[in-house]
Amino acid sequence: MTLRLAPAIPIGEANLLHSSLPEGDHPVWAVGTNYIIGDQVMRDHWRYECVQAHQGEDPAGDTLNQYWIRLGATNRWRPFDRFITDQAIGEVGVAMVYRLGQIQQPVSAVSCFGLAGSDITLTVTDPNDGVVYAETISLVDTSLIIDAFTYCFEPQRVRSEAVFNEIPPYAQATYEISLTSPDAEPKIGQIVLGREYDMGEALFGTSFGIDDYSTAERDRWGNMTIVERPFSKVVDYRGRVPTEQGRRIAIILEENRAKPVVLFGGKDSDQIGVTVYGKLSDWSVNTGDPIESELRLKVEGLT
């Protein structure tokens, strides 16, 4: 199984060509308007709540949160705010569609996280050659079905991640993501476009788990109160690379050391549990012999 890394390409207003979700969460902030505590507005695709009555203070410039606190991205823009658990939510039975374009970098992988739905489709279209890539991934998760009992009684689950890779890197292409959910609200946490890099062969010995930010506190009688909060995945990859490619691997990892990246192990690696969107936290290459070297790579996932 090939280990692949795809640095996330920032998505701005020029790149979002279409979304089926309206952006009407709150009124747009207006200069000179009187605001009172509890008023909510939109500004540059972010949502803000007033915490002190005032007239026309710009929420984008209120870095001390004197007048406004930022609540998060608008529903339409949540797939690009780098928070997986802050999902864009659509209407039951209506496909959620995003179309992206004018990407100034090669794109060979599109990854989606925080999904809820029945299936997700990526269609890549070039203005000259037409559709150059189209694939649908079912989000039905059967990993907990291990025998006749679980087949009959295990609740239906969905896969929360989907990775489309080996996409032809057309310079002028548009990327349309369509998520369907006939019986529930479709949800998308993050849409990540990037160019994938071959990082060698993934080996057994890779470990994965989570950092849980929930809290558990006991009172003086020992009663415990649990507050559920987000968690992030932590994956410690073990791989094998040709020793002669050590410098190439080092350059790729150094250039992306403080940027969000997607790590995955090829087709259907999300079923194994090692697909992660996060930050490189530690890595090393052990040059064991002139032919092959060992790669250790740790990634801390975004929440």
Image: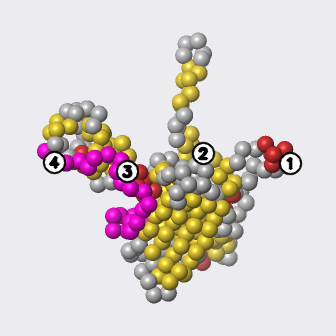
Please tell me which residue is depicted at 58% across the width and 75% down the height of the picture: 134
Q: Which mark is residue 210?
A: 2
Taking depth in this image into account, of 299 and 288 the one nearest to the observer is 299
Find disc 3 in the rendering and name its residue.
74
Residue 186 in percent (x, y) is at 54, 53
- From this viewpoint, is residue 273 visible? no
Where on the picture, by quarter, is residue 138? bottom right
Task: Give x and y (percent) for residue 4.
Answer: 59, 68
Q: Horizontal and vertical percent for residue 99?
A: 44, 68
Cα distance, mark 2 to mark 1? 30 Å
Above or below, 287 against 92 in this view is: below
Q: Residue furthest top?
A: 221
Question: Of helix, strand and loop, which one carries label 2?
Answer: strand
Mark 3, secondary structure of its residue: loop
Q: Is residue 20 magenta?
A: yes
CA distance for labels 3 and 1? 44 Å
* Occupied quadrant, residue 17: bottom left
The numbered mark, 1 or 4, whose residue comes first in the sequence reads 4
**SS at circle 4:** loop
Tell me what residue is drawn at x 63 percent, y 57 percent: 118
Residue closest to the eye, 297 or 62: 62
Residue 31: mark: 4
For marks 1 and 4, give the CA distance. 63 Å
